Image (cartoon, rainbow, N blue to C red):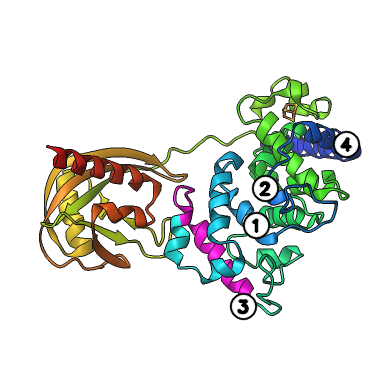
Amino acid sequence: MAVASALGAESEQTNDALEGLVHQAPALRAALLHWWEANGRLRVPWKLRPNGSRPAPGEPLCAFQTWVAEVMLQQTRLEVVLPYWQRWMETFPTALALARADTQQVLLCWQGLGYYARARRLQQGARLLVQAPGATHAAPHEPIAWPRELEGWLALPGIGRSTAGGILSSAFDLPYPILDGNVKRVLARLLACPTPPARSLARFWELSGKLLDRARPRDFNQALMDLGALVCTPRSPRCGACPWQSHCAAYAAGVPAAYPVKDAPRPLPFQVIGVGVVLDGAGRVLIDQRLNEGLLGGLWEFPGGKQEPGEAIEATIERELVEELAIQVEVGEELIRLDHAYSHKRLRFVVHLCRWISGEPQPLTCQQVRWVEPAELAHFPFPAANARIIAALLARLGAADAA
Ligand code: SF4
């Protein structure tokens, strides 16, 4: 009972803070946009006209370019996204080009950005859009009837409400709010919200919507993201440079970095993976392509699998290669070991060189298996952890050649 009434009091307090901010919305908008004009990231390429100038209010920009950018930004910072986005636009300049592309090429273009499902879903979305009624394929940047409402974007794979709002405000200057990680952090601090944002999403959406400058939604949403990325940063917010300092409850409380409040982190499961880099007598290396489902679906990798309790890593590799590919190998020396953290688990890859002994490789648990020359590995999309395995292999083979 005491807990329930304490939670009720917290909720009321947050509602009061929210109402207060809504009353201050005109001042908040003006201060943010004024700050942004002087300090914001004004040269984001997909927010500019093709000639590099800023668009007029309400002027539409290329929806395809914006869509790709917003999907890349879902898990990745702007500075990292920019070179990938440039390369993507050179490779797939239109939705039509993306829809017609080979999926392997799409994954290769995404390689290094992680969360590869995003690339596959972008292509699925492009295929849906170019087949939809109203698609004309006539103009290079407007081959299809781009949705101008939330529902049209939400119907595409991999698009949530914040990404859809980001696309609609950015491409068409339409008044849709956003609520990505940066924005949640800024709003949680403005409110000094006593609970994690995930438990108050409706309130956060309401606040993002009520603060939005409906006359300049493209600029306002970009300014809000820039404030989160440049000033109201996760660990050390630069409150002295913040246009919202005088409105901010976390600043007033003297503990801005204490927000957003987080639930105690759960320990991530840890797993050791035995990996075999199998070479045949001709010096070719064996790789396999994962099934299309899952986090790394469709990517190539070196075969291997989870170490069982009490199992030596060499035995793990031998067993996995029989179970996955029906081959026998002789497990040789360790090539490299590396740790990799995903959002939901931590993995240690222990990678051994192996000599193929017998058995024609069969794709028992994957899409396909191939023997390739080591120099050809760069032509296949691999998960990030495998890039270090490839580098170690090429270095080892180079050293062996030189000896
Ligand atoms: Fe973030 Fe500090 Fe600005 Fe508050 S005053 S919004 S904590 S940077």
| Magenta stretch in the rendered image | 109-130
Residue beneath disc 4: 30
**Label pair 1/2, CB-CB below 8 angstroms:** yes
Residue beneath disc 1: 65
Q: Quadrant of ligand 1?
A: top right
Q: Residues within 10 Å of mark 3 (few under 14, many from 20)?
A: some
Which callout, 1 or 3, points at the residue further toward the start of the chain? Answer: 1
Task: In the rendered view, tell whether residue 362 sits above or below residue 74.
Answer: below
Q: What is the quadrant of residue 220 in the picture?
A: top right
Disc 1 versus disc 3: nearer the observer: 1
Which callout, 3 or 4, points at the residue further toward the start of the chain? Answer: 4
Q: Judge by depth and name the residue closer to the eye, 110 or 239.
A: 110
Secondary structure found at label 2: helix
The answer to if 127 sits in the magenta stretch is: yes
Q: What numbered label is drawn on residue 45?
A: 2
Residue 42 image point, x, y percent: 73, 40
**Distance between the alpha carbons at the discs numbered 2 and 4:** 24 Å
Residue 25 image point, x, y percent: 88, 39
Q: In the rendered structure, which amino acid carries the disc numbered 3?
A: Gln
The answer to if 243 sits in the magenta stretch is: no
Quadrant in which the C terminus appears: top left
**Label pair 4/1, CB-CB below 8 angstroms:** no
Residue beneath disc 3: 131
Disc 2 versus disc 3: nearer the observer: 2
Residue 180 image point, x, y percent: 66, 46
